[in-house]
Image (tube, helix red, strand yellow):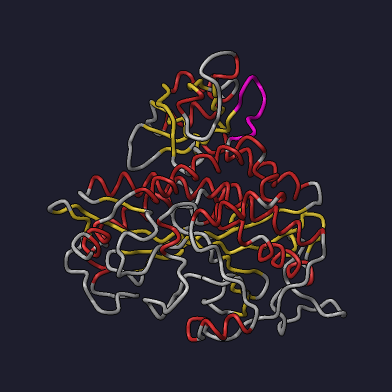
Amino acid sequence: MKDLRERLLAQGVHTLIAQFTDLHGVARGKFVPLAHLDDLLTEGIAFSGPSIAGTGLPRCGPRSEYWARGAASTAVALPWMPGYARVVCDGFVAGEPFEACPRQVLRRQVSRLAAKGWHLRTGIEPEFFLLKQQNGQWQPADGADRPDKPGYDLKSLPRQRVFLQSLQQALEACGLDVLQFDHRDAHGQYEVNFGFDEVLASADHLMLFKQAAHGLAESAGMVFSMMPKPFADQPASGQHFHVSLWSGTQLDRNGNSRNLFVPHRPDGAVDAAVQLSPLGEQFAAGVLAHSAALCALAAPTVNSHKRLMVGESISTPCWAPAYVTQGANNRTALLRTLHGRFEWRLPDASANPYLASAAMIAAGLDGITRKLSLPAAVDDDLFALSLAEIHARGIAPLPRDLGAALDALAADPVVCDALGPVLSAQFQQLKRAEFSAFARHVSDWELRRYAAAF
């Protein structure tokens, strides 16, 4: 702690941000003077438990206090907030790890992997919008961003170069490996890719990215948004996970951790003609088998399901998945299988990275335990097939709305057990209330269509 304090002091840090993540995937926390670093890293910093979404903690008694205990290895000075350093925290209640803390939920699944000598690596690809409000309407922050095909547009992208470069430099200064930025398929929409990392670190990185992007966008007079689909006539924001499973006990020929998803021939050579190893296929099959329940966590808002729509795609290059399928390098499938990894395309930008990752691991491990077979690869453009063809092939659709996804979650003991009884109940209660509020809401579309119709 002394070395850490001296390092932070040398970087001009005077205040710590004790940051944890709530059930909705939103960063929460307090400012803590650097002088109290020891307190943050040992006992933790106290919060009123009932004030935090999804804890289910009482308003009084010893279990009403939520303690955020910092992980020293995550302490990092924030370039966009000189003098401040973020410390990622785990939740504790009554001196024990709190089962409904999203980071603790992921820790439990990481421990299950570790018991087998395994660890999971993810590369997360968040998409996001840069917006502004004008005359009460949300619009792209760049008013000139209006091409018919915005994907990879090199007129719009340079106009946001100051923001994107500032974001890149801030994240790299915090130790993140920023691979690339690009303009996506909607007006005002962008994507950033990060290098692979351990699954817990990847989730921490995503939360840091969101904090940096919020702060830098606000400074530039913009709103950083990870709302999945802010515009009805434009594509939505995904948050794809590239997934691979590694062994610390089985090493490759260079003595490094071995990627267990890489297929090998009987002679031990890598089989370049196959995408996944048998173990990888079982893991992927588990993810597919639990897709309906996973949808509640990977697409956790009412708005999310306006991204996952059956029917003709708005944008041809990159579609959101609507069907429970896998295919080799098939971007219209839910799982895009690649050599030695798969891309899980279900999560959208609003997904809590800890909960989505934890549930995905539990589903994959169930596939391994039950030795599930991976369904046959689909090579077709799924959006070029009619619904009759989809049904004839026996391809299952994802849940049509948040209510159906919550029903699937409630019926899936594997995913609910991964979340734990407290968080599972809290998640379903809060999301049921969200869906009910949406169902009761009368929209402008309804008024335009029905007010004078009958």
Front residue (pair 9, 244)? 244
Q: Residue at x 38, y 26 (%)?
A: 14
Image quarter (top left, top right, bottom left or bottom right) of the N terminus: top right
Residue 28 occupies which quadrant of the picture? top left
- Measured from the top left, where is residue 154 in percent x and y? 28, 75
Q: Is residue 311 above or below residue 258?
A: below
Q: Residue at x 23, y 58 (%)?
A: 447
Instruction: Farthest residue to the top: give it.
Output: 61
Q: Range of the magenta residues?
A: 92-100
**What is the total number of numbered labels drawn onto the structure image?**
0
Instruction: Farthest residue to the front: give it.
Output: 454
Q: Residue at x 77, y 54 (%)?
A: 248
Image quarter (top left, top right, bottom left or bottom right) of the C terminus: bottom left
Residue 82 occupies which quadrant of the picture? top left
Front residue (pair 295, 285)? 295
Residue 427 occupies which quadrant of the picture? top right
- Measured from the top left, where is residue 356 in percent x and y? 57, 52
Residue 234 magenta-highlighted: no
Q: Residue at x 48, y 49 (%)?
A: 175
Instruction: Farthest residue to the right: give it.
Output: 266
Residue 98 magenta-highlighted: yes
Instruction: Farthest residue to the left: give it.
Output: 135
- Measured from the top left, where is residue 158 in percent x and y? 25, 68
Front residue (pair 98, 443)? 443
Residue 109 placement, left or right of 429: right
- Measured from the top left, where is residue 313 in percent x and y? 41, 77
Residue 18 placement, left or right of 278: left
Residue 241 placement, left or right of 308: right
Q: Is residue 6 above or below residue 421?
A: above
Q: Is residue 6 above or below residue 255?
A: above
Q: Is residue 269 above or below residue 47?
A: below
